[in-house]
């Protein structure tokens, strides 16, 4: 990861895409798997999963298991 992507105050990495962009990508593909959405933004699967889980915790999206795969959809 690039050092210039770190927030100078917190030291945390800043995302390459917004929650709104992630939700829009999900809306266009739902239901969608984590890997599919990670591919859209050229990010890691764990990074995409973390962001999707945060959106689910906020009540903006939901998930379910389909054939052993977690898929994401809008609420």
Image (cartoon, rainbow, N blue to C red):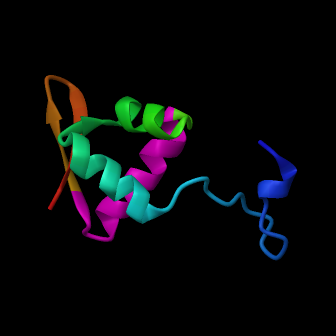
Per the picture, the main secondary structure of the magenta-coloured stretch is helix
In the rendering, at what x and y percent does residue 66 appear?
13, 30
Which of the 4 image quarters holds residue 31?
top left
User: Which quadrant would the N terminus be assigned to in this image?
Assistant: top right
Residue stretch in magenta: 45-61
Q: In the drawing, does residue 24 fall left or right of residue 44?
A: left
Q: Is residue 44 above or below residue 2?
A: above
Does 49 lie within the magenta span? Answer: yes
Determine the residue positioned at 47% across, 50% down.
50
Of all residues shown, which one is farthest toward the bottom? 9
In the rendering, at what x and y percent does residue 48 appear?
47, 44
In the rendering, at what x and y percent does residue 64 appear?
16, 42
Q: In the drawing, does residue 31 fall left or right of residue 42?
A: left
Residue 17 or residue 68, whichever sits in front: 17
Determine the residue positioned at 24% across, 59% down.
61
Does 41 lie within the magenta span? Answer: no
Residue 29 or residue 60, whichever sits in front: 29
In the rendering, at what x and y percent does residue 24 appear?
32, 55
Q: In this view, does 73 lie above or below 46?
A: below
Determine the residue positioned at 32% across, 65% down.
57
Q: In the drawing, does residue 4 fall left or right of residue 20?
A: right
User: Which quadrant would the C terminus be assigned to in this image?
Assistant: bottom left
Determine the residue positioned at 54% across, 55% down.
17
Of all residues shown, which one is farthest toward the top? 67
């Amino acid at each position: 990861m690039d050092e210039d992507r770190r927030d100078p105050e917190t030291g945390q990495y800043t995302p390459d895409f917004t929650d709104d962009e992630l939700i829009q990508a999900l809306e266009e593909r739902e239901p969608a798997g984590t890997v599919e959405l990670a591919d859209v933004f050229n990010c890691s699967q764990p990074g995409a999963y973390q962001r999707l889980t945060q959106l689910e915790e906020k009540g903006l999206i939901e998930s379910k298991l389909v054939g052993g795969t977690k898929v994401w959809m809008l609420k």
